[in-house]
Image (tube, grey):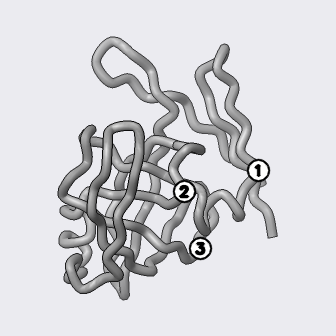
């Protein structure tokens, strides 16, 4: 199955941002995330985890290094739903994001899709795997 996403506008620029649902236990909420092939793991604002009822700081603590420096995050296993595909993924939650956008990273997530980026058309194409 193929799902297409059109880039979203933030200010004057367009970015490869997708809508998704994130779930923990029986709670689900909609979020948006920047598709980031440079992110080893998906990184969400800690408020997303708290909204799902997660005790964020009880997760496995890790230090994440990126282009904007180092941040501390707490990893939890949860459910993600992109397009019509639901899967489990480890997600790192932090209060220290340099930009106010969640990141859809590689670990557990990219393995579920073949992702094509059409920069000239400003769209993403997710093809389900497995």
For residue 103, side relative to residue 84 (left or right): left
Q: Residue 102: percent from the left, percent from the top?
A: 36, 49
Q: Are marks 1 and 2 in contact (CB under 8 Å)?
A: no
Q: Are marks 2 and 3 in contact (CB under 8 Å)?
A: no
Q: Secondary structure at mark 2?
A: loop
The residue wearing badge 1 is 114
- Tell me if mark 3 has few (under 14), some (14-19) or many (20+) residues whose alpha carbon lies within 10 angstroms of its own: some
Q: Residue at x 32, y 43 (%)?
A: 69
Q: CA distance from mark 3 to mark 1?
A: 15 Å
Q: Secondary structure at mark 3?
A: strand
The residue wearing badge 3 is 87
Q: Name the N-terminal-most of marks 1 and 2.
A: 2
Q: Quadrant of the C terminus?
A: bottom right
Q: Residue at x 38, y 79 (%)?
A: 76
Q: Are marks 3 and 1 in contact (CB under 8 Å)?
A: no
Q: CA distance from mark 1 to mark 2?
A: 16 Å
- Tell me if mark 1 has few (under 14), some (14-19) or many (20+) residues whose alpha carbon lies within 10 angstroms of its own: few
Labelled disc at residue 12: none
The residue wearing badge 2 is 40
Q: CA distance from mark 2 to mark 3?
A: 17 Å
């Amino acid at each position: 199955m193929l799902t297409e996403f059109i880039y979203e506008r933030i200010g004057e620029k367009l970015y490869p941002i997708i809508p998704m649902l994130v779930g923990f236990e029986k709670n689900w909420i909609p979020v948006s995330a920047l598709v980031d092939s440079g992110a080893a793991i998906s990184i969400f604002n800690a408020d997303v985890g708290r909204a799902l009822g997660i005790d964020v700081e009880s997760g496995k603590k890790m230090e994440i290094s990126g282009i904007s420096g180092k941040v501390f995050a707490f990893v939890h296993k949860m459910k993600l739903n992109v397009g019509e595909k639901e899967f489990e993924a480890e997600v790192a939650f932090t209060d220290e994001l340099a930009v106010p956008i969640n990141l859809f990273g590689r670990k557990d997530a990219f393995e579920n899709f073949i992702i094509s980026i059409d920069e000239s058309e400003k769209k993403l194409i997710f093809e389900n795997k497995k």
